[in-house]
Image: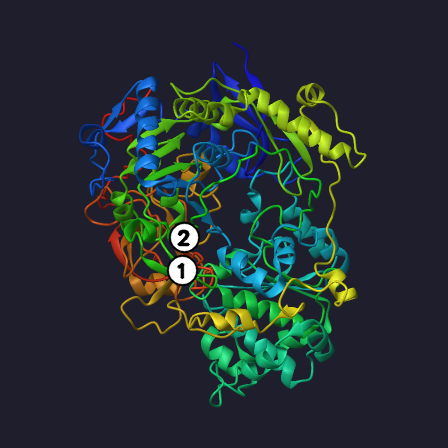
Amino acid sequence: MAVTSHPTNAHWGSYQVVVDEGRVVGVRPNQEDPAHSPIMQNVPDAQHHTTRVARPTVRRRWLDHGPGPDPRRGDPEDDYVEVEWETVLDLLARELDRVRTEHGNQAIYGGSYGWGSAGRVHHAQSLVHRFLNSIGGYTRSRTTYSHGAIEVLFPRILGTPIANRMLHRAPSWTQIREHTELLVSFGGLRVSNTWNTSGGRAAQTAGPSMRAASDAGVQYVSLSPLRDDMPDDVKAEWVPVRPGTDTAVMLGLMHVLFTEDLADTGFLDRYTEGADVVRSYVLGGRDEQGNRPGLARTPEWAERVSGVPAAEIRELARRMAEKRTLVNVGWSVQRARYGEQPLWAGLALACCLGQVGLPGTGFACGYGSIGNYGGGSTPLGLPRLPQGDNAVSEFIPVTRIADALLHPGGAYRFDGEDRRYPDLRLVYWAGGNPFHHHQDLKRLTKAFGRAETVVVNETHWTATARHADIVIPATTTLERDDIAASRGDLSVRTMPRAVAPHGQARNEYDTFAALAERLGSGERFTEGRTSSQWLRHIYEQWRSMVARKDIEVPPFETFWAQGRVEMPGRVEDEALLGEFRADPDRNALRTPSGRIELFSSTIDSFGYEDCPGHPVWFAGPSVGDRTGEFPLVMVANQPSGRLHSQQDMGAHSRSQKVRGRAPLRLHPDDAAGHGVDDGDVVRVSSAVGSCLAGVVVSDAVGPGIVQLSTGTWYDPSSPDVDCAHGNPNAITEDVGTSALSQGCTGQLTRVRLERFAGPEDGLPPVRAFEPPHGVTGV
């Protein structure tokens, strides 16, 4: 059999896989990609790894005792039984029918985070939601772990249309290169984050665009605890800031603008609501309750909180007022307690500069956070598999899944509503791994134990699969035909099958079609089409929609033969809020005032102590001195070795590990103070839990800070620690940003370190990549 090469696409980009004797043996970047992601190097090992789910599998205790809460769910020593496909489909169909009949469809939680595949048909989130909708609906999740605070706050203070544009149609890097003089980014502009885009991109353009803007004279300032949150080949100033104190720096900057008459009062008066409230707060006229003299948020105050010298804050404020300035707040900054505040304060800071709505200036929240932010937009839409209508209105914020399972009927607050958690009995997860995204994994394990049945469609034996009662083997992207495209993408591309399915893995579409047929909704789910026919159907629907704009793209057969079609109607977005600036009366925002709400009477009316009606400073749990039980602050940023937790066993991901554990970076002074050096293994502990990690000493991390990226596979197999492999969510607290958005707070945690083992000492084995008991493999 000849060696062959096959084009494919993933969330980390387009590339070629090399196949020999039916196995993936290598990968090649596409020549048109100027900055391909090294994450593709994980693919060969992951495709045929021993952790692949090869057969339908059922947890023995569930099989023997039937549905019901079980505290043993997730036990590393649990046994599983491989069964035939007809057996598992019959079991699962009966269980779904039991739950919906006895408890209603709202007792089914459809969990999916959408990152399982870059394909437009074999998209796990779309498929599981379409299936559950076809059988009567399900309780869904709202918002995301990535930017939940953004999704709730900005519709309140900017209106939903502009909030959506803020996330999905930011001004392009071309506009920045041509119009911006100074880009001030809270949270930096980390290039490895831009390798990933939901749906992938034909070419990685964010990194080269940053460099092109720098070469054109754009000045960058990165306020971050990590120096390498800005690429080395971009001329940038690093302003080290203590984690969780960005809001304090923003308030200090605004204090300078107000006291030195640098604030654009004309803009504030015409385009914003509540600027006087923010000004009074910053200058100390009133406190948050407005009933006594407050504290002036001077640069000196900001220095005490953040560690950024007052003189540096003053100088930066003056530069921002003098130049065409873009204020960027990265997604990481809002993934902490009170995460709404740096977003709101950043917008207020940009409004004080008076440049909102001008090309290349104003405010943004996502440059350096994902690959398609600033990479153009596709207003004509993309081929899309319809999910159908959900007959169940019940939902929970995505980050509150453990609360919902642990406290059915419990009260909680969210976006102005007093709500109660639904009584969830069955959890169906597909295309996601909550044991990567969620915090306090011991608590999440306890929560999964409260369900009656947990079902997972998976390609690999992830931690979530190992907490499931029924595990359905799913094909990978390389084992099926599909098409790829993302928001702002350069093209729509084919994803032809490269290798045969692993073991007995099936396309999820076929699994759901078989289940729907058993539950009496087969026609509603399939509409009489196979997955191949859906592939053609959604492409031709999209082609017809594009044709209504007098743009022609080739028919499906031509597209599939040539492998791609250039994206029709793609645009390079210009100034956000430009129309509003030009005529704020005719183009009033969809807010109560019609303007940018620096004070929101709506949010204020909610009475939330942790999110009042205007941006304020709250000292989150990451802020404090270094003398307590947990003297260090852990930054759990996104990994550069993989996408989330995907393919952690791959070559590129493994190359970054230290003695098989996740790498933990810390400053040389902290390493010396703790008596550790490169290559040592440390126990990292918090009030929540502990994990092991391998030491990397680096001055790219500020003093008093340790950095441990997310995504290492959870391994609770050792009695010595909660995770032997280094998953930081074993030690992060499961609490929302505030009652407003209930966003993720996993970015920052107070921890302590102790040396666990040196180079010659024994260590607990890493068992994350061992299949569970009873699984024989292919």
Closer to the camera, 130 or 294?
130
Left or right relative to 81: residue 134: right
Q: Counting other residues with Cα less than 10 Å from the Cα at mark 1, is it few (<14), some (14-19), or many (20 or more)?
A: many
Q: Earlier in the sequence, mark 1 or mark 2?
A: 2
Left or right relative to 171: residue 499: left
Instruction: Tell me where residue 5 appears, x and y as whole percent.
Output: 58, 20
Give the quarter of the image for residue 735.
bottom left
Instruction: Tell me where residue 617 appears, x and y as whole percent.
Output: 48, 75
According to the image, what is the colour scheme of the structure? rainbow
Q: Secondary structure at mark 1?
A: loop
From where the camera sits, is residue 676 visible? yes
Q: Which residue is mark 1?
A: 736
Residue 93 vertical position relative to residue 293 in the rendered view, above or below: above
Left or right relative to 704: residue 587: right
Instruction: Tell me where residue 439 appears, x and y as whole percent.
Output: 36, 53
Spatial distance from mark 1 to mark 2, Cα to Cα?
7 Å
> Of the residues shown, which amino acid type is indicated by label 1?
Gly
Contact? badges 1 and 2 (CB < 8 Å): yes
Residue 696 vertical position relative to residue 97 in the rendered view, above or below: below
From where the camera sits, is residue 55 visible? no
Closer to the camera, 163 or 39?
163
Residue 277 vertical position relative to residue 71 in the rendered view, above or below: below
Label number found at residue 705: none
Q: Which residue is mark 2?
A: 399
